[in-house]
Image (tube, grey):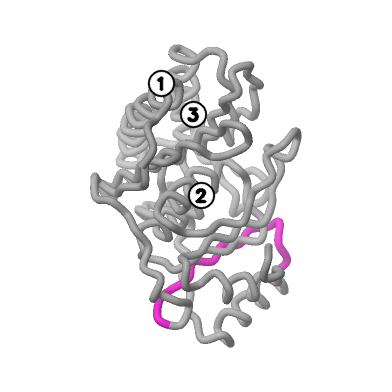
Amino acid sequence: MTSLTPDLGARFTLAQDIVRAAGALALDYFENRETLVIETKRDLQDVVSIADRNVETMIRDRVAEHFPEDGFLGEEYGLVDGTSGYTWVVDPIDGTSPFVNGMPNWCVSIAVLHDSEPVIGVISAPCHDELYLSAKGQGATLNGKVLSLDPSRTIRNAVTGLGANNHVTPAFVGKMVENLLEAGGNFIRNGSGALMLAYVAAGRLVGYYEPYMHAWDCLAGYCLITEAGGWVLPFPVEGGALTKGAPVLAASPGAIKDLKKIAGLPADA
């Protein structure tokens, strides 16, 4: 385990404080969700509430207070460029559909990028009282317990997470499910890609595949998985790519080959 630089250490400490506070704020909205006004985005399944916006605003304000020179990308209010080389990438509530429908499968996801790499990944799942923490060279933890992935787990003796949305055709989704089942695997989808990526880091899922995902959904989970000993398909973050979607694939060591094949990727991807 390497030492944190002062710059990274200060941001890691702040990220932990913020994700705890953001989780508590989001949980309060969840417990009073009957008062929320729900709006739709791209289609009737893509929803947003004042909770998403207010949680993101709180996170933005806290980051700006301590590191005004840092960039910030949030799902609700977009990208503000910074000058420090650090960019915070935030989904204030990933899994808004479960959230507004009273299901516990949602989380607050915060990543920090430096030199195009996720160097901090923290995720709070308040309904489960779970806090996932990771920073480059520091490993990953769940409620203080160190996470280390088991290479004996494969798609055939464990479960894979899959994600889908209206950016992907029903035929493509059907084919990826078919490919996984034909390879001897099984799958779940709980409505929060960020939370399922955290589950990969925790060893609960052996991998996760979603053909189209945004940076705010995946980069915190990517840091967690890498620090727990897993593999992730690089997500494009240079220039305008950071605000666009891309395929997301993550795997425990024993599932990498199979999941690359299922996703149609070359072995050396």
Residue found at x 49% / y 29%: 56
Residue 65, position as x, y percentages in the image? 45, 12
Q: Earlier in the sequence, mark 2 or mark 3?
A: 3
Q: Crowding near pointer 2: few (<14 within 10 Å), some, many (20+)?
A: many
Q: Element under label 2?
A: helix
The picture quadrant where one finds residue 48 is top right
Q: Earlier in the sequence, mark 3 or mark 1?
A: 1
Q: Element under label 3?
A: helix
Q: Is residue 34 visible?
A: no
Q: Crowding near pointer 3: few (<14 within 10 Å), some, many (20+)?
A: many
Q: Which residues are magenta?
A: 157-170
Report if the CB atoms under discs 3 and 1 are less than 8 Å apart. no
Q: Which mark is residue 6?
A: 1
- In the current view of this chain or complex, which residue is farthest to the right? 240
What is the tally of numbered marks visible in this picture? Answer: 3
Q: Is residue 110 visible?
A: yes
The one nearer the camera, 25 or 225, is: 225
Residue found at x 37% / y 62%: 149
Is 254 placed left or right of 28 in the picture?
A: right
Q: Inspect the image, locate mark 3, and give the three-letter code of the amino acid beneath it.
A: Glu
Image quarter (top left, top right, bottom left or bottom right) of the C terminus: bottom right
Judging by the rendered image, the residue that carries numbered circle 2 is 222
Which secondary structure type mostly characterizes the magenta part of the structure?
loop
Q: Earlier in the sequence, mark 2 or mark 1?
A: 1
The one nearer the camera, 38 or 91, is: 91
Q: Inspect the image, locate mark 1, and give the three-letter code of the amino acid beneath it.
A: Pro
**Cα distance between the residues tagged 2 and 3:** 20 Å
Q: Element under label 1?
A: helix
Residue 228, position as x, y percentages in the image? 40, 54
The one nearer the camera, 23 or 54, is: 23
160 magenta-colored: yes
Judging by the rendered image, the residue that carries numbered circle 3 is 56
